Image (cartoon, grey):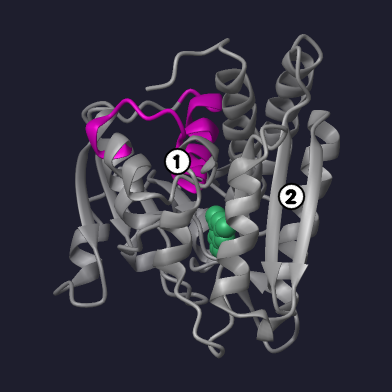
Amino acid sequence: MAQLLSGTAVSAKVLERIAEETRTLPVQPTLAVIIVGDDPASRVYVNNKKKACAKAGFRSLEYALPAEAGQAALLGRIAALNADPSVHGILCQMPLPKSFGYDEQEVAQAISPEKDVDAFHPVNVGHIMLGEPLFQPCTPAGVLELLDDAGISLAGKHVAVVGRSNIVGKPMALLALHRHATVTVCHSRTADLAAVTRQADVLIVAVGRANFITADMIRDGAVVVDVGMNRLDSGKLCGDVDFAAAQAKASWITPVPGGVGPMTIAMLMRNTLTAAKASCGILGMK
Ligand code: GUN
C-alpha cells in the first residue's frame, strides 16, 4: 500500500517558511492577479492564490476584466502593472476566453520577465532550459518539492512524464533531467504507452483525462505523481490516475485533490518572494 505524498501538508510548511522570511523583508511582496471572464474553475484558482498570499503575508491585487474587454485592454492593464514598482509579481489566469480575440502567447510575452512569477515568458523558459532560472515553473517545482520532502531522489532513476504541455510536461522533463534522471516524455502519439510507463521508477502524469493511468501501467513500487485535475459529472474532483488501484501497486502516490495542486500555489508564492527580494537588491537577478 502506497504512502501518501501530501501537498496539503508540505505546502503549509513551505508557506510558513515564506511567511517567516517575508517578515524580515523591507518590502511587502505584492502579487497582481488578472482574471478575464467568468470561468468558474479560474475563479476558484484565483481565490486560492489570494488565500495563499494572505497566509504568506503578501499583498494581493485582483484585476477582474469582463470577457468582452479584449486583448488591447488586457495588454494595457499588464503595461500599467509592469510600470508599477510596488508590484513584484504579475500573473494572468489562463485559459483566456475563446472569443474576443485573445492571444495567450502575446500575453505571456507582455509581462515583464522580472515580474513573470508563472515563468511563462520566453526569457524565463530559456533560463529553465539552461538550468539556473530565477523563477521556477510552478507545477514542476511543486512536484520536486513534494519528492524532496519525502526523501525521494531522482538521480539515476527512470522518470516517465506523460503529457507534453508547455506549463507542465516539458518543464517537468527538464527539471527531472537537471536532477540527473533518465527521462522519457510520453504523449498521445506514443506507441505502447503502457510498455513505457511500466518501466518508470517515477511516473508523472499530466494529461487531463480521468482514470487515464490504470494499475497495469504502473511498475510495482513506483512513485506516482498525478498532476491531473478533472471534474466528473458528479462534481467530484479526480486526477488522471485510477487512484484506488494505483495505491495498491505504488510505493508513494499523490492524492487529488490535496497533492500537486496546493504545491503549485506554494511555488507561485516562492517565486513572488524571489521577485520582491530581487526588486530590492537582496538577490542578484539572473
Ligand atoms: N491555468 C492553469 N494553470 C495555470 C498556471 O499555473 N498559471 C496561470 N496563470 N494560469 C493557469
Q: Is residue 56 above or below residue 220?
A: above
Q: Which quarter of the rendered image does ligand 1 occupy?
A: bottom right
Front position in the image: 78 or 91:
78
Amino acid found under the numbered disc labelled 1: Pro
C-alpha span from label 2 to label 1: 20 Å
Quadrant in which the C terminus is drawn: top left
The residue positioned 61% from the left and 30% from the top of the image is 270
Q: Is residue 93 visible?
A: no
Element type where label 1 sits in the image: helix
The residue positioned 30% from the left and 62% from the top of the image is 164
Q: Which image quarter: residue 193? A: bottom left
Amino acid found under the numbered disc labelled 2: Lys
Residue with the mark numbered 2: 49
Front position in the image: 52 or 99:
99
The residue positioned 55% from the left and 47% from the top of the image is 1
Q: Position of residue 114 (x, y in %)?
A: 49, 35
Q: Is residue 145 above or below residue 249?
A: above
Front position in the image: 31 or 141:
31
Q: Provide the major secondary structure of the magenta segment.
A: helix
Q: Residue furthest left?
A: 191
The residue positioned 58% from the left and 53% from the top of the image is 79
Q: Position of residue 146 (x, y in %)?
A: 54, 35
Which label is found at residue 113?
Answer: 1
Q: Write down the region rendered in magenta.
A: 128-151
Q: Which image quarter: residue 194? A: bottom left
